[in-house]
Image (cartoon, rainbow, N blue to C red):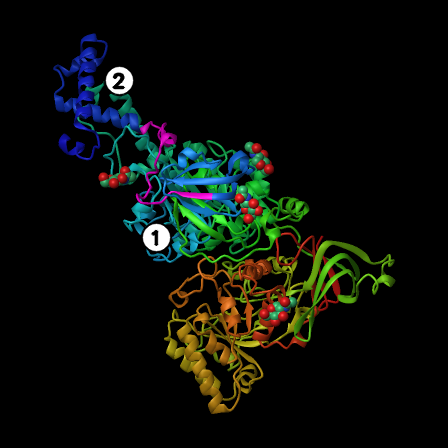
Amino acid sequence: MPESYKWAGHAETPSRRWSRLYLLVVAFTALYFSGRTSLQVLGSRPSASELVKREHILDQCRYIKTPAGPPADFHARQESDRFVPGTKPVLIKNATIWTSGQNGTEVVEGDLLLHKGLIKAVGDVPLKLLQGLQLEVVDAYGAWVTPGIVDIHSHLGVYSASDGNSVKAPILPWLRSLDGLNTHDAAYELTRSGGVTTAQILPGSANNIGGQAFVMKLRETKERSPTSMLVEPPYTLNGSHFDHDLPPRWRHMKHACGENPSGVYSMTRMDTGWNFRQAYDTARQIRDKQDSFCAKAEAGAWAELGDASFPEDLQWEALVDVLRGRVKLAVHCYEAVDLDGIVRLTNEFKFPVASFHHAGETYLVPDLIKKTWGGAPTVALFAANFRKKREAYRGSEFAPRVLTSHGIPVAMKSDHPVVNSRYLLHEAAQVHYYGLESNVALLSVTATPANAMGLGHRLGRIQEGYDADVVIWDSHPLSLGSVPQQVFIDGIPQLTSPHVSAKPSSFQSPPNTPNFDKEAADAFAYEGLPPLDARPIKRAIFVNVDSMYTRSEGDLAVQERPDVVVVQDGKVICSGRAMCSGYLSDKYAEVIDLKGGSIVPGLTTYGTPLGLVEIRLEPSTNDGSVLNPLAKDPPAVLGDGLIRAVDGLQFEGRNTLLAYRGGVTAAVTAPSGSFVQGVSTAFSLGAPNILQSGSIQSDVAVHVAITKNSAQSVSTQIAALRQLLLGHGGDEMLSRVREGTATLVVDVNSADIMASLLRLKAEYEKVSGKTLKLTFAGAIESHLIAKEIAQAGVSVIVTQPKPYPDTWDQRRILAGPPLTADSQVTALLAAGVNVGVGLVDEYEARNLRWEVARLALSSDGGINRTTALALATTNLEKALGIHHGDMPDDLVAYAGGDVFDFEGKVVAAISAQLGRTDVFV
Ligand SMILES: *[C@@H]1O[C@H](CO)[C@@H](O)[C@H](O)[C@H]1NC(C)=O
Ligand SMILES: *[C@@H]1O[C@H](CO)[C@@H](O)[C@H](O)[C@H]1NC(C)=O
Ligand SMILES: *[C@@H]1O[C@H](CO)[C@@H](O)[C@H](O)[C@H]1NC(C)=O
Ligand SMILES: *[C@@H]1O[C@H](CO)[C@@H](O)[C@H](O)[C@H]1NC(C)=O
């Protein structure tokens, strides 16, 4: 390769180049005459082109040893490299600024100046900075302002077009997530609207080494290209010909161990271990060759090097950079066995890890984590998404606080779309609820992930000279359901006409969270599987009760400030101090102080496979899925009966018991399957099995799913449903649906399919003279035909209270505040539809109360407390066709707060169904 070509990519000016060359010539001449090296073997003076080549080699040798990071004068910058000319300077006045400073405890009250893509002043903005600026002034009226939320683990843009995983081989360090980054992913806008400004886009976890990751900002760019979205991309993106005088920027890479790569490649963990060692050995050999080559070059032993060129391999150069400590490595690993393997690997090959991801068991092995070569990595966690697979079974909401107590940094992450990254801050808020200090919780989605990615010099803080990525919130960021009023990225406002709801004034301070010290200690002591059974008692006296809601004739009745409530055998026997005076001295009753808390009906959950699934990806723990009768003839032995969920129910699962401890006392679960799913069942979460008061109602409704993703056309599915409705005989529940005494629940998302179903309902009713009780579940596009749904008397169960357009069928979501004033639920309620709220993932069943509360909190008063409760009780039950008299009057006692905030803690379930009170503390 001619030298002139090699130089083509250099940014150096010719004069600088020649002056360097001059210096080199001088140096060589001096060495030549000093005679103390082996230069004499050259026999003659090196040619000019030889000197250029040598200089290039020495350049490269110097460069590979240069540590990565920002240039020394980085903080002297006056303008961001991402500044968009024309962006107006912004003065945010009267803000309560959480800066990330002082370990996340610093709060500055004052103003904030954003200019040239940077934060120019915090607190008191000197007048001289404002002179001559055409300012955009934003009055925050004292609102909380934080740095933009940083997501250390996202697949935004790469999963929407299935570009997140290559399955060509387990070791692929040469791949780059950037090459699959779809700039049209609808999730960018949604995620920004949750205050997320930066995300690390990782390749998937199908491989042991899935490839290189990139950090991007989530705003649109003028160029509209993936590359233009990157933050400090490594110079290597432009090939190897770049200015070697600049310090290298951090690179990023993903590794994964455990079930995901094993599943894809039919490997064992032992294979994974060897894959890694073999890969690192290859990289080490290249690195060693480079080092000895450079040692010779630096010693001037050019003759020994002869014509050899710098040892390089394009496939392995990134992994070599890992060994040189210039890559921020993100390692997906769950279990102690996997973490141990990686920790040994880092010590064998001597490279650091920036972050362990998912890392469900890190909190159980903190000493092991600290043995990682180069020090403990940041641990990136979910708040609640556990138990989906065996390796995640021991995950805990207490992991962040345990790790923090060991001095190990914790970041909360989305793994978007696994957790919708729009709600990343909610992950931090949840772990704060479970006892992680508020300063650390906020750091976990700002400075901590920014530091772990090597971007702590510009992201994750509100400090002069940092990138102008800031969020103005409508309430304290750790309060339930906080929503951005405005999001700035590089100083550019991202929300054009944000819709903001007034929040309760108490939500302006961090929530006064309950004490979970015992639960956290148990989680550690029992290696992630603490006992979850309750302590049953016969009679309890609840004192300091602020309010009590009870079911009454299908509605909810409220009693304010009863103060005292006495229960016996799972039933309220009196409320109010006067009414209960006769019981107060009962020394056999247990007194439970609710500290101003409340008693409300147990919630009912629908939409998850709770009771049929324990570990979703572990078939031996689950009921399994129902045959699709359109795909295959069901075996004759089944006859024409429908599959009944009640026949497959299992009790005392961890998701079930955690939901019970979360205030959910009943679940309605349908069999899992495509098209005709079968008959759902209602059961009690606190029961030990179906025979001991487990069953609330054996057969609830008939369930059918109609989607565009099926092997059969939508029209085929609807034709088959028509045949089932208009036919005769068959299953008794189907006959009841035909008679109008049982409900047909259709899992459906597309508004077009729902419209066709409304026509089918009308057609059926005309032909049969009967009423078809119809409910749509999922129904994410239902707001588009809300009026027609209401007119047809059809109920809707919204199963994605955090709406996300996962498939084409779901693309027309109503995003809710701050993007739209209405949410799907408020739009349906306004049209007069009976609406219930369900969930899809069984791990989330325990969080139903917060999901409903968020909807209410951002409804600007549209959803009051009674309606909010009804969404997860009476409305939902009505939608499923359960008569109000058929639901037990189960109640749940919350201490220290309410069902709908981050302050109340469930202390007891007063179970009419079980005839006892289950105490959880
Ligand atoms: C930061 O705050 C947390 C929680 O209050 C504490 O555990 C930790 O030691 C603090 N770190 C430093 C460096 O002060
Ligand atoms: C900041 O806003 C709060 C809330 O509106 C207001 O009470 C306070 O007076 C304002 N402070 C300043 C300095 O404007
Ligand atoms: C790559 O080269 C282009 C064109 O010269 C330049 O605009 C860009 O900043 C370079 N990128 C990096 C990461 O050096
Ligand atoms: C709550 O809202 C519903 C529906 O708007 C209304 O009917 C009901 O009266 C409200 N309840 C209270 C206590 O305000």
Residue highlighted by disc 2: 299
The residue located at (30%, 46%) in the rendering is: 228
Q: Say what amino acid the circle numbered 2 marks.
A: Ala
| Nearer-N-terminus badge (2/1) | 1
| Most common secondary structure along the magenta stretch | loop
Q: Is residue 105 left or right of residue 213?
A: right
Percent of width and height locating residue 726: 47, 88
The residue located at (49%, 80%) in the rendering is: 791
Q: Does the beta carbon of the residue at mark 2 sit less than 8 Å from ligand 3?
A: no
Q: Nearer the viewer, residue 910 or 443?
A: 443
Mark 1 crowdedness (10 Å alpha carbons): few <14, some 14-19, many ≥20 = some
Q: Quadrant of ligand 2?
A: top right
Q: Nearer the viewer, residue 837 or 822?
A: 822
Percent of width and height locating residue 475: 55, 51
Mark 2 in CB contact with mark 1 (< 8 angstroms) = no
Residue highlighted by disc 1: 167
Q: Is residue 640 left or right of residue 895?
A: left
Percent of width and height locating residue 105: 56, 37
Kind of element beneath mark 2: helix
Residue 86 in the magenta stretch? The answer is yes
Q: Is residue 47 left or right of residue 865?
A: left
Compared to residue 630, the image places residue 248 above or below, namely above
Q: Does the beta carbon of the residue at mark 1 sit less than 8 Å from ligand 3?
A: no
The residue located at (44%, 64%) in the rendering is: 814
Compared to residue 853, the image places residue 68 above or below, namely above
Q: Say what amino acid the circle numbered 1 marks.
A: Val
The residue located at (56%, 73%) in the rendering is: 680
Percent of width and height locating residue 292: 29, 24
The magenta segment is 64-92
Residue 900, quarter of the rendered image: bottom right
**Dot label at residue 668:** none
